[in-house]
Image: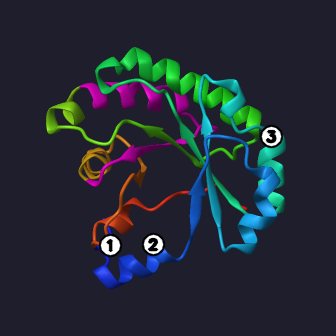
Amino acid sequence: RPPSPTATEASRIMAALRGCDSPFAIAAHAASLRLRGIDFVMRRYSRDQPCNLDVDEARRLSAAGLRIGALWDANVGIDSLSRRQGLLDGADALRLARAAGQPPGSAIYFTLGEEATRADIDGVLSHYLAGVRSALGGAAGYRVGVRGSHPMCAGLVDRGLAAVSWLASTSPDALAARHALLQWPA
């Protein structure tokens, strides 16, 4: 494991890219976003079809020079998560990622709520993410990312349950840089 960066290094890394998050198509604003200094856009995959990133939007965002991050939004509470739900969510996210042209090996982030206890991480989240990894895995698969609080993300990444994380709220501490985004290349 590489050493953790200093607080100064973490701030520099985090300041390197600026982005935004949108639950709706944003390609019509891509040029304006780039002019305002936005480097990446986090977009959604979900069971709500109108909110999903599609191949046309991905091409338009990439053509404008924006990187793309993908977030699966199951819109369920932590008590609804299980291995079976992870398999279902992972299979749906996989189908949508392939349809949007997301490059294999990039990450799909799964939103798991803002807070989780150690028992949640070792129990329900572990089982859920095992299902997700199973659905997304393989040579042509995607990396599993998680979105949530720093303690939750650190716990999941440190246990090997997720490859990368996106912090819902980030402080400029030395640990934050370990959870940097893995975007889709521009």
Q: Which mark is residue 105?
A: none
- Residue 6, above or below 95: below
Q: Residue flagged by tag 2: what amino acid is it? A: Met
Residue 6: where, in percent of width, then height? Answer: 29, 81
Answer whether residue 144 is magenta in the image: yes
Disc tally is 3
Q: Position of residue 153 (x, y in %)?
A: 32, 49
At mark 1, the secondary structure is: loop
Q: Along the horizontal axis of the image, is 168 left or right of 90?
A: left
Q: CA distance from mark 2 to mark 3?
A: 28 Å
**90 left or right, relative to 112:** right
- The amino acid type of the residue labelled 3 equals Val
The answer to whether residue 65 of the structure is visible from this angle is no
- Whole-percent x, y for residue 16 in the image: 53, 77
- Could you tell me which secondary element the residue under label 2 belongs to? helix
Q: Is residue 105 left or right of residue 171?
A: right
Mark 3 closeness class: few <14, some 14–19, many ≥20 residues within 10 Å? some
Which label sits on residue 55?
Answer: 3
Is there a contact, CB below 8 Å, between mark 2 and mark 3? Answer: no
In front: mark 1 or mark 3?
1
* Residue at 71%, 39% in the rendered image: 53
Identify the mark nearer the N-term, 1 or 2: 2
In this figure, which residue is indicated by the disc labeled 2? Answer: 14
Q: Which residue is mark 1?
A: 172
Vertical order, 126 against 182 (above or below) = above
Q: Which residues are magenta?
A: 124-150
Query: Mark 2 and mark 1 in contact (Cβ < 8 Å)?
Result: yes
Question: Which mark is first along the chain, 3 or 2?
Answer: 2
Label 1 amino acid? Pro
Categorize mark 2 by other alpha carbons within 10 Å: few (<14), some (14-19), many (20+).
Answer: some
Front position in the image: 163 or 85: 85
